[in-house]
Image (cartoon, rainbow, N blue to C red):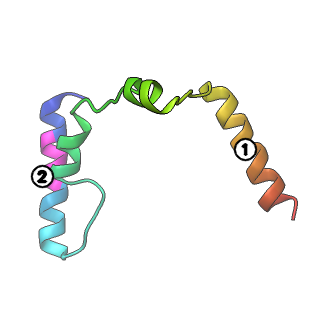
Amino acid sequence: MPNFMRIIIGYIGTCFEFITHKSILINNKTMKLSSENHYYKADKAKRELGFNPRPVKETIKDTVNWFTNEYISN
């Protein structure tokens, strides 16, 4: 999404919050955050704590299986 659209949508949300006195998920602050690059490296955790992340697909599969066994089958 082009940056100018984020700005416009964000301020529309902020105006809506101001008028209605209700918080919504899309406002100028959240749209600004969505345009920033947030990422982290696990190098320090690997080096100092022995952290060894698993592949994402394996983690998702195990999570779905856990929810299925704990909540859906009961």
Residue at 56%, 27% (x, y): give it: 52
- In front of the other: 61 or 43: 43
Q: For mark 2, does the 10 Å Cα neighbourhood hold few (<14), some (14 to 19), or many (20 or more) residues?
A: some
Is residue 11 located in the magenta-colored stretch of the structure? Answer: yes
15 relative to 40 in the view: left or right: left
* Residue for badge 1: 64
> Where's the N terminus, which quadrant?
top left
Main SS of the magenta part reads helix
Is residue 69 located in the magenta-colored stretch of the structure? Answer: no
* Residue for badge 2: 11
Q: Residue furthest bottom?
A: 21
> Where's the C terminus, which quadrant?
bottom right
Q: Earlier in the sequence, mark 1 or mark 2?
A: 2
Mark 1, secondary structure of its residue:
helix
Q: Is residue 49 above or below residue 74?
A: above
- In front of the other: 51 or 53: 51
In front: label 1 or label 2: 1
Q: What separation in Å lies between label 1 and label 2 (alpha carbons)?
A: 38 Å
Q: Quadrant of residue 61?
A: top right
Residue at 17%, 36% (x, y): give it: 5
Q: Residue furthest right?
A: 73
Locate residue 43, reporting x and y percent.
39, 23
Which amino acid is tagged 1? Val
Residue at 25%, 68% (x, y): give it: 23
Q: Is residue 43 above or below residue 4?
A: above
Locate residue 48, reporting x and y percent.
43, 30
Residue at 56%, 28% (x, y): give it: 53
The residue segment tinted magenta is: 7-12
- In front of the other: 71 or 48: 48
38 relative to 66 in the view: left or right: left
48 relative to 28 in the view: left or right: right
